[in-house]
């Protein structure tokens, strides 16, 4: 089996980029919960996150990505999520506030 590495690296980077956008929308949704129009904004951002994932998968399929590329993109997404989650945790187990994200 001969796999070309470049499409897999590109898929990993694309998955990581989708994860960054997804997590940014999630962060915006969580921050919206503290405002007066919390429910509407949170639901709107949740729908936008779902559209982002469906668009990324649809785009990958339309571009001819196979199972290996889609799986590698998923790995890029999960690795980025794990890094963001670990960065948000303090060593003592407390969550960081807004000052920790500067």
Image: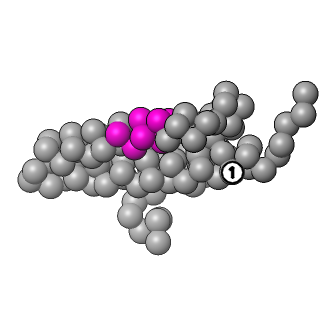
Residue 85 or residue 72, whichever sits in front: 72
Which residues are drawn in magenta?
A: 51-58
Identify the residue shown where x is 85% and y is 37%.
3
* Quarter assignment of residue 48: top left
Query: Dot 1, crowdedness within 10 Å: few (<14), some or many (≥20)?
Result: some
Q: Is residue 43 left or right of residue 24?
A: left
Q: Locate residue 52, reporting x and y percent.
A: 40, 43
- Work out whether residue 100 can be spotted: yes
Q: Locate residue 28, reporting x and y percent.
A: 31, 54
Magenta-highlighted stretch: main secondary structure? helix
Residue 39 or residue 86, whichever sits in front: 39
Residue 62 or residue 56, whichever sits in front: 62
Identify the residue shown where x is 47% and y is 65%.
100
Identify the residue shown where x is 78% and y is 50%.
6
The quadrant of the image that shows the N terminus is top right
Q: How many marks?
A: 1
For mark 1, give the secondary structure.
Answer: helix
- Work out whether residue 89 can be spotted: no
Identify the residue shown where x is 51% and y is 49%.
18
Instruction: Find the residue positioned furthest to the left.
Output: 36
Residue 18 in the magenta stretch? The answer is no
Identify the residue position indicated by label 1 in the image.
Answer: 10
Q: Is residue 87 left or right of residue 11?
A: left
């Amino acid at each position: 089996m001969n796999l070309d590495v470049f499409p897999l690296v590109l898929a990993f980077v694309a998955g990581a980029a989708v994860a960054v956008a997804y997590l940014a929308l999630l962060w915006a949704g969580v921050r919206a919960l503290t405002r007066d129009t919390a429910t509407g904004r949170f639901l709107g951002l949740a729908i936008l996150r779902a559209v982002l994932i469906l668009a990324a998968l649809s785009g990958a399929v339309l571009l001819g990505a196979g199972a290996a590329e889609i799986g590698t993109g998923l790995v890029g997404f999960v690795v980025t999520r794990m890094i963001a989650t670990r960065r948000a945790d303090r060593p003592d187990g407390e969550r960081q506030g807004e000052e920790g994200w500067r």
